[in-house]
């Protein structure tokens, strides 16, 4: 009985590690977001103006700008990954 429990626990941990690896590959990349922010946004926008907002709010705003449904002086062409990366980068910075 003990061996079966140990086997079940080992199997569960292995499955969890595999799934964790699968999901982290899809996670947004803050470093890539920083590069995109610096090359696309920082000329007009200060990071501190947006820091502290949630990723979901930032993604919604960026999607709206890209789609043209949210007013913005420049047309942005960012991919879905770019949007997620920039939102992750901004949300990961503390407001100053």
Image (cartoon, grey):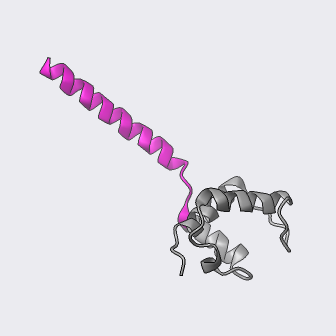
Q: Is residue 24 magenta?
A: yes
**Left or right of 1 in this view: 17:** right
**Left or right of 89 in this view: 7:** left
Report the number of discs. Answer: 0
Highlighted range, magenta: 1-30
Q: Position of residue 5 (x, y in %)?
A: 20, 23
Q: Position of residue 52 (x, y in %)?
A: 56, 70
Q: Is residue 26 above or below residue 76?
A: above
Quarter holding the N terminus? top left
Q: Quadrant of residue 66?
A: bottom right
Q: Quadrant of residue 47?
A: bottom right
Between residue 71 and residue 8, name the one nearer to us. Answer: 71
Which residue: 19% across, 27% down?
Answer: 6
Which residue: 54% across, 64% down?
Answer: 30
Q: Main secondary structure of the magenta part?
A: helix
Q: Position of residue 81 (x, y in %)?
A: 66, 55
**Left or right of 17 in this view: 49:** right
Q: Is residue 31 above or below residue 6?
A: below
Which residue: 60% across, 59% down?
Answer: 55
Which residue: 70% across, 53% down?
Answer: 80
Residue, far left: 2
**Left or right of 80 in this view: 55:** left
Q: Position of residue 78 (x, y in %)?
A: 75, 61
């Amino acid at each position: 009985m003990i061996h079966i429990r140990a086997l079940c626990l080992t199997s569960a941990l292995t499955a969890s590690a595999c799934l964790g690896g699968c999901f982290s590959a899809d996670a947004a990349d803050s470093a890539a977001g920083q590069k995109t922010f610096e090359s696309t946004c920082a000329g007009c926008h200060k990071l501190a103006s947006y820091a502290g907002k949630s990723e979901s709010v930032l993604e919604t705003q960026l999607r709206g700008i890209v789609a043209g449904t949210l007013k913005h002086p420049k047309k942005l062409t960012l991919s879905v990954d770019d949007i997620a990366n920039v939102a992750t980068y901004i949300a990961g910075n503390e407001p100053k």
